[in-house]
Amino acid sequence: MANRFISRIEDGEISTEGELKSAFRALAIATHPDLGDADSRGESFIKARAEYEAAVRYLAPKPGTASAGGGGTRGRFDRDLFYADLEGLLKAGFPKLARHDQERRKYARLRLNVRSSLSAWDRREAGGRVAAFDAFERSLLAMKASPDPSRVEPILALVEEMIEYAECGVVPLRASIEIEFAALRATRTEAAVIGFLGTLVGDMDGGPALG
């Protein structure tokens, strides 16, 4: 039987140690022998604990990597890593629902990296960026399934420009990003999309989010 916690990590439901602990706590309450029939619960709790410990190792930094999920140095937000992770996710076909196991694991790891970075960013500066990213992803998936999926293309193109600007800091590109972002806002693009893009635009020069 698959590890329930690792499956949720690969599906993108869990991306931080805190989320993993919360998931284990909920399962522990349901299986701990001190909270019910000891005979029927004991084995289930032992199994849940073993799965949790394996998931902790799965989520932990690997030798030579920066952090759990690759999101930042020892849990700290690393801007360069974040934009590198975001670029990798876009190249992997974001947003999508991966179908095959190998593809799902690779895509989930990239998505985990991005969410881990955003979680570290939220710990440094409160802002709800993980939730904003999740809402952004859901909105884009809905657009892809709509009668006009082409609406997704200019949004992803803008994100690519933001990544490029983060890497090179070319001033004319910054101006282009602001113009394109303003154009998206004028078309009444979904609030979830504008919200996450605004966070990225605001971060370009370390200024306030433009939303």
Image: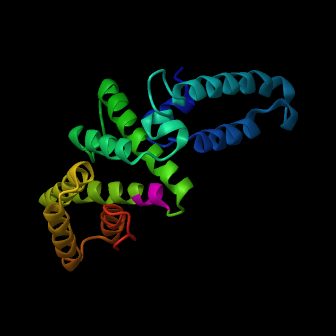
The residue at 15%/61% (across/down) is 173
Residue found 20% across the figure and 64% down from its top: 174
Q: Is residue 32 magenta?
A: no
Residue 118 visible to an observer of this rendering: yes
Q: Which quadrant does the N terminus fall into? A: top right
Q: Position of residue 61 (x, y in %)?
A: 51, 28
Image point (50%, 34%), residue name? 68
Which SS does the magenta portion mostly show?
helix
Residue at the farthest bottom position: 186
Q: Quadrant of the C terminus?
A: bottom left
Q: Is residue 58 left or right of residue 96?
A: right
By what rule are the colours in the image chosen? rainbow
* Residue nearest the viewer, comparing 190 with 79: 79
Q: Is residue 147 visible?
A: no
- Count the labels in the image: 0
Q: Residue at x 18, y 55 (%)?
A: 161
Residue closer to the observer: 171 or 184 = 171
Snapshot quadrant of residue 88: top left
Spot occupied by residue 190 in the image (x, y as percentages of width and height): 29, 70
Residue 202 left/right relative to 29:
left
Q: In the rendered image of this protein, does residue 209 appear above or below residue 55?
A: below
Question: Magenta part of the protein: which range?
Answer: 128-132
Where residue 112 appears, x then y in whole percent?
Answer: 42, 39
**Nearer to us in this view, 179 or 59:** 179
Q: Position of residue 40 (x, y in %)?
A: 79, 25
Q: Is residue 136 above or below residue 83?
A: below
Splitting the image into 4 quarters, where does residue 103 fall? Answer: top left
